[in-house]
Amino acid sequence: MADCVFEIKSLKKSFGDRDVLLGIDLTVNKGEVVSIIGASGSGKSTMLRCLNLLEEPTSGDILYKGESILAKDFNPNDYRTKVGMVFQHFNLFNNMNVLKNCMVGQTKVLKKTKEEAEKTAKFYLEKVGMLDFINSKPRQLSGGQKQRVAIARALAMNPDVLLFDEPTSALDPEMVGEVLEVMKDLAKTGLTMLVVTHEMGFAKNVSTRVVFMDEGVIAEDDIPDVVFNNPTNPRTKEFLSKVL
């Protein structure tokens, strides 16, 4: 189990009397690209937000490299530097230009020097094709450009894992491709990625594993070929017949 990054055990989450996660068990190993698919409201984003401690689970446990992230003495800030998150609506700082957006976490949280942070920021902005926009403010960018900056910002923290919460769903159709290209390239680097997505092409062709969630539980968890071509759960078949 040396390469186990996440082990989720009997994870439950309720909002008031609405049960969203009904007992999730999932293991994610180093270097895996796990796509999480399912209908809206199936609990996909809630599970991801529990992994990043943006939501507090109602019960169950989440182990990160063997350590419970829900333990009283666990340091969430330190953890969040290792587990990056890319949001649906980018969450960039509107008052800062692109370069500063990618430097601020490094200087404030990782305590890097300005010079180090700038060098790292430029390295990743170049990787996502946004180096020419370092002086632009977010409002001057398209949705696809904002999301590429958000990915560069997450990568600049040198995380072990990146969580993507529907990274293309707020984008115009013509912007989706450019963000998916960046994510495909990332997947090839061996970075551990969990991706909540409606992009079935990405799930099918880029993932090492596909998890299908249905009404708060994991209904299917297998390699893409099995999930898309020979699913065992009738709900998976029904969902895929609607979206493909």
Image (spheres, rainbow, N blue to C red):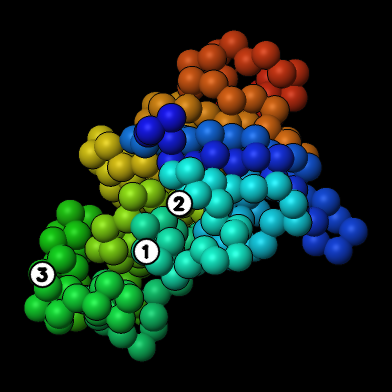
Query: Taking 145 as reference, is 53 left or right?
Result: right
Which residue is the extreme one toward the top?
Answer: 230
Q: Nearer the viewer, residue 136 or 231?
A: 231
Identify the mark at residue 81; answer none if there is no mark: 1
Write the residue at 19% across / 68% down.
121
Element marked by disc 1: helix
Residue type, numbered disc 1:
Thr
Q: How many marks?
A: 3
Chain-order first, disc 1 or disc 3: 1
* Vertical order, 196 against 232 (above or below): below
Measuring 33% from the left and 50% from the top, which residue is drawn there?
Answer: 160
Q: Quick check: 226 left or right of 18?
A: left
Q: Which mark is residue 163?
A: 2
Q: Which residue does the numbered mark 3 point to in the structure image?
A: 119
Q: Residue at x 60, y 41 (%)?
A: 8
92 w.r.t. 129: above or below: below
| Image quadrant containing the C terminus | top right
Say left or right for 161 vs 76: left
First reached walking from the N terminus: tag 2 or tag 1? 1
